[in-house]
Amino acid sequence: MERAEITRGQLDIVATPIGNLEDLSPRAQRVLREADRILVEDRRHAQRLFQSIGLQPRTEPLHEHNEREQIPRILAWLAAGEHLALISDAGMPLISDPGYPLVSELRRAGVRIAVIPGPSALLAALALAGLPTDRFCFEGFLPAKSGARQQRLQELAQETRTLVFYEAPHRILDTLQEMCDRFGAERGAVLARELTKLHEEGIGENLGEILATLNAHPERQRGEMCLVVAGAAASAAAEADLDQLLRPLLAELPLAQAVRIAEAQSALPHRRLYQRALA
Ligand code: SAM
């Protein structure tokens, strides 16, 4: 398809509320009114949003099971000059939600794309948690299968940036227990629950405390939740760096010699390297 043809239409990516309908911005409302069609993750869910602003738009389903097969139809609508909007069930589309294959394909095709920013549980939880925000990483949902989850948590144990996870209520206790085992129960953390809704709350100071609170109050295991976890202390990360330096040397050489070489390579104090090598 010709690039010039495609650029007649436009796709607007529109963030929608994560619980509180008042969070739909005036600009988002205008774009939804003006769109020729709205791509929605779930029609019934979207209906509630549209009703709240008295809208009866033409909708097309776009969810994880049909996204790729919808792309050619969407390209054809855009080529015909249509103005499309993309929403998901809540928050920012593409963020643990459908839209990534579509947007990447449309960019390649030269389609004009705009984003109408707004609510997203990720940033709301991070802001609420009061943990360092200068550097953070978004982990979305952990894998559902136990082996893959353990592996992911192991990989993240030394991450020094603040970590943000999405989690489902039926997994939260297991996740907290696994994180206590891998990261330590003292690791700083906040569970951001029911953001923007009536029972919004931020639970806990650390992983162990959140687990204890949820065990004592089963009703607080329900609802929508994000887990924000403090990064590993810089010292823990430094230990991991030391291990990386020492491990190959220790595999080949006696301890004292391995430490001497590590000392020469890193200019770190002998005592620190020696103790780590012993450990
Ligand atoms: N695209 C959405 C966004 O921008 O936040 C996220 C969609 S993802 C499928 C849904 C997950 O986001 C939930 O399982 C929960 O972890 C988190 N979430 C969504 N709304 C929330 C809320 N009101 N409070 C806390 N977490 C929420």
Image (spheres, rainbow, N blue to C red):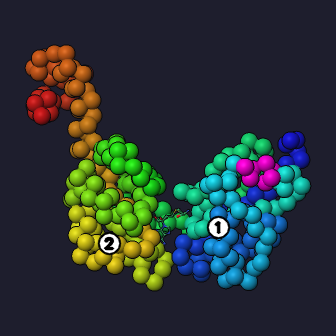
Neighbor class of circle 2 (other Cα within 10 Å; few <14, some 14-19, many 20+) is many
Dot 2 falls on a residue whose secondary structure is strand
- Asked whether disc 2 touches disc 1, contact meaning CB atoms under 8 Å apart, the reply is no
Rendering coords of residue 198 (x, y %): 46, 84
Residue 96 lies, with reference to residue 198, above or below; the image says above
* Ligand 1 lies under 8 Å from the Cβ of mark 1: no
Q: Residue at x 88, y 57 (%)?
A: 81
Front in this rendered view, residue 253 or 218: 218
- Which residue does the numbered mark 2 point to in the structure image? 203
Front in this rendered view, residue 167 or 28: 167
- Sequence-wise first label, 2 or 1: 1
Residue 186 lies, with reference to residue 89, above or below; the image says above
Q: Amino acid at mark 1?
A: Asp
Q: Report the side of 84 relative to 179 (left or right).
A: right
Q: Report the side of 216 relative to 163 (left or right).
A: left
Front in this rendered view, residue 114 or 108: 108
Indicate which disc residue 42 carries: 1
Q: Which residues are magenta?
A: 69-75
Residue 251 lies, with reference to residue 122, above or below; the image says above
Q: Residue at x 41, y 53 (%)?
A: 144
> What is the spatial separation of the Cα atoms under label 2 and label 1, in whole angstroms?
31 Å
Q: Is residue 35 shown to the viewer in this render?
A: no
Rendering coords of residue 103 (x, y %): 69, 50
Q: Quadrant of the N terminus?
A: top right
Q: Residue at x 27, y 29 (%)?
A: 244
Queried whether the magenta region covers residue 225, the answer comes back as: no
Rendering coords of residue 75 (x, y %): 81, 50
Neighbor class of circle 1 (other Cα within 10 Å; few <14, some 14-19, many 20+) is some
Q: Residue at x 68, y 59 (%)?
A: 62
Which mark's residue is nearer the viewer, 2 or 1?
A: 1
* Ligand 1 lies under 8 Å from the Cβ of mark 2: no
